[in-house]
Image (cartoon, rainbow, N blue to C red):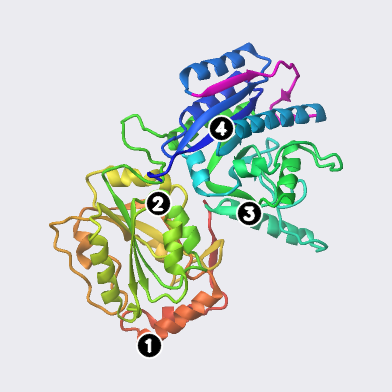
């Protein structure tokens, strides 16, 4: 994106807020990154407390390109310790405010509008990340306890007013089936990715294209759905615009004043520039001198987990080395597209080398070293770290005492459970996946055709440490993948010379012991 003009984004928000909450919201806006975007702000002052209005004026003094427009209205909006109390008049007043902001975007030819409620806190790279997603309408997720003792729910839904489970038109479901599908939806929303939904709001990036096409918050007279966001979403769908949610960087919702207790923790884990002046730990392309290179072997991965995995990795890597080991699908094109904007070095093997894995791993290592990496992250195309890795990885790279980090790898047997029994215990041990390259160290390999290791054998002689961060492995999650791997291992190592035949046979166990993953 260095050679392109920065996208112009208008950040808009109708503001009727308590001072304590508004102060944190404005602090969050000040942290927003603008490396790849140019931000302006349009805040509609609908406050009844003078101190809140003054906070907006102070923000205008401190930040460039800020417009504060008084609403010249005075309506009571009640937020108590339990919930927020809306009525029809308030809802459509807010809708009018949002449509006024839309008019500004169109008139001034902004590329995007980012509408955000004034009780949300954002990750610094939220807007840049959403722009890179290249969707006309996409929201960043946040979670809310709508009642004090209820479970948190996301602000997005699938159908109707707020249905958060999949149900086809005319399909009848039991209460148990609804519960299972609802939990499945929540699990998906907790998994980093971009997903199509039926409804969204409150933290949404909208393209100029969609706005010019007529997407807005005007009331649809023959629709009884509650809330201006539902009318917005229905109109967008009718006009042919898909609705998407990103779940990589969940916003923090100060829904009630008691939620202020979590503000400092949120700011602490998402800070853009820590107090000691280190580089940002939340970024897409690091400017740190500690270059992190992803090293990966792929083969026919385009319809498996590659998209989900690379979208996560691009949040913290600086470069990628991909060895395509004989793919017959569009894996290479998918890698280039998913890592667009990041240097990618791809080597294509016309014939797979996996039958002699040591040859393949040495090739991967040598090609990776050609890119002059500082750190090497060696992962397969079906492996990804738990979400908090993105906030911790820079700390690992910037310390000077350790050269190799070891992690636990969890073998998932479906989307939500990992396997644990006497043959499947990888998550009870630590293995190296992240290593600093030391130019003058004499690396040597375990010379076996199978199970030779991803890194040289003597890497353990370098200063090393275990990390509590966890690695998720989805290579066994589908029955078809398990059958394919079983057949491959039995063909390449039928006597168990390099592995364990009993473990190979256990791949096809019909009733394995599975444990639910917990964040």
Is 24 rendered above or below residue 382? above
Real-space Cα distance between discs 1 and 4? 62 Å
Real-space Cα distance between discs 4 and 2? 24 Å
Q: Counting residues from the N terminus, which is met first, the one under dot 3 or under dot 1?
A: 3
Residue indicated by mark 1: 494
Q: Counting residues from the N terminus, which is met first, the one under dot 2 or under dot 1?
A: 2
Is 187 rendered above or below residue 259? below
Real-space Cα distance between discs 3 and 1? 44 Å
Q: Counting residues from the N terminus, which is met first, the one under dot 3 or under dot 4?
A: 4
How many residues crowd around disc 4 within 10 Å: few (fewer than 14), some, or many (20 or more)? many
Q: Residue 484, position in %: x, y?
A: 48, 80
Q: Residue 268, position in %: x, y?
A: 44, 33
Residue indicated by mark 2: 341
Q: Residue 448, position in %: x, y?
A: 25, 78
Residue at 85% x, 39% y: name it: 221
Residue indicated by mark 3: 196
Q: Quadrant of residue 218?
A: top right
Contact, mark 1 vs mark 4 (Cβ under 8 Å): no
Q: Which mark is residue 10?
A: 4
Q: Secondary structure at mark 4?
A: strand
Residue at 69% x, 59% y: name it: 180
Q: Is residue 86 left or right of residue 365?
A: right
How many residues crowd around disc 3 within 10 Å: few (fewer than 14), some, or many (20 or more)? some
Q: Would residue 120 be seen by someone viewing this image from the given angle? A: no
- What residue range appears in magenta? 65-87
């Amino acid at each position: 994106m260095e050679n392109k003009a920065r996208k112009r984004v208008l950040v808009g928000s109708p503001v009727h807020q308590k001072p304590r909450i508004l102060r944190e919201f404005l602090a969050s806006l000040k942290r927003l990154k603008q490396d790849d975007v140019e931000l302006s702000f349009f805040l509609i002052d609908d406050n009844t407390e003078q101190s809140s209005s003054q906070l907006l004026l102070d923000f205008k003094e401190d930040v460039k390109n800020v417009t504060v427009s008084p609403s010249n209205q005075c309506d009571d909006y009640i937020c108590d310790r339990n919930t927020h109390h809306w009525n029809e008049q308030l809802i459509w007043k807010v809708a009018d405010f949002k449509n006024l902001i839309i008019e500004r975007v169109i008139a001034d030819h902004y590329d995007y509008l980012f509408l955000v409620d004034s009780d949300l806190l954002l990750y610094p790279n939220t807007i840049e990340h959403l722009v890179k997603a290249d969707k006309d309408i996409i929201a960043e997720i946040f979670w809310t306890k709508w009642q004090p003792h209820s479970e948190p729910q996301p602000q997005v839904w699938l159908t109707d007013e707020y249905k958060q489970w999949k149900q086809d038109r005319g399909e009848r479901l039991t209460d148990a089936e609804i519960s299972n599908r609802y939990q499945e939806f929540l699990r998906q929303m907790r998994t980093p990715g971009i997903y199509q939904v039926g409804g969204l709001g409150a933290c949404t990036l909208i393209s100029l294209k969609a706005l010019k096409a007529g997407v807005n918050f005007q009331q649809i007279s023959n629709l009884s759905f509650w809330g201006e966001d539902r009318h917005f979403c229905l109109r967008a769908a009718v006009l042919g615009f898909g609705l998407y949610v990103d779940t990589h960087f969940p916003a923090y919702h100060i829904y009630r004043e008691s939620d202020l207790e979590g503000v400092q923790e949120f700011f602490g884990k998402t800070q853009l520039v820590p107090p000691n002046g280190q580089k940002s730990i939340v970024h897409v392309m690091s400017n740190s001198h500690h270059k992190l290179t992803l090293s990966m072997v792929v083969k026919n991965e385009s319809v498996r987990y590659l998209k989900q995995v690379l979208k996560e990795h691009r949040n913290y890597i600086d470069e990628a080395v991909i060895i395509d080991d004989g793919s017959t699908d569009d894996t290479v094109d998918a890698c280039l597209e998913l890592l667009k904007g990041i240097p990618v070095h791809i080597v294509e093997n016309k014939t797979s080398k996996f039958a002699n894995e040591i040859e393949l791993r040495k090739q991967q290592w040598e090609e990776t070293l050609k890119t002059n990496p500082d750190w090497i992250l060696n992962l397969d195309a079906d492996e990804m770290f738990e979400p908090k890795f993105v906030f911790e990885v820079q700390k690992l790279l910037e310390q000077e005492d350790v050269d190799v980090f070891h992690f636990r790898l969890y073998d998932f047997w479906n989307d939500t459970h990992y396997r644990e029994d006497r043959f499947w215990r990888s998550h009870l041990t630590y293995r190296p996946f992240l290593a600093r390259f030391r130019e003058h160290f004499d690396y040597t390999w375990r010379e076996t055709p199978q199970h030779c290791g991803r890194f040289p054998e003597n890497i353990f002689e370098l200063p090393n440490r275990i990390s509590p961060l966890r690695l998720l492995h989805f290579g066994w999650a589908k029955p078809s993948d398990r059958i394919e791997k079983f057949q491959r291992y039995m063909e390449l190592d039928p006597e168990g010379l390099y592995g364990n035949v009993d473990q190979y046979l256990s791949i096809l166990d019909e009733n394995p012991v599975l444990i639910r993953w917990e964040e």
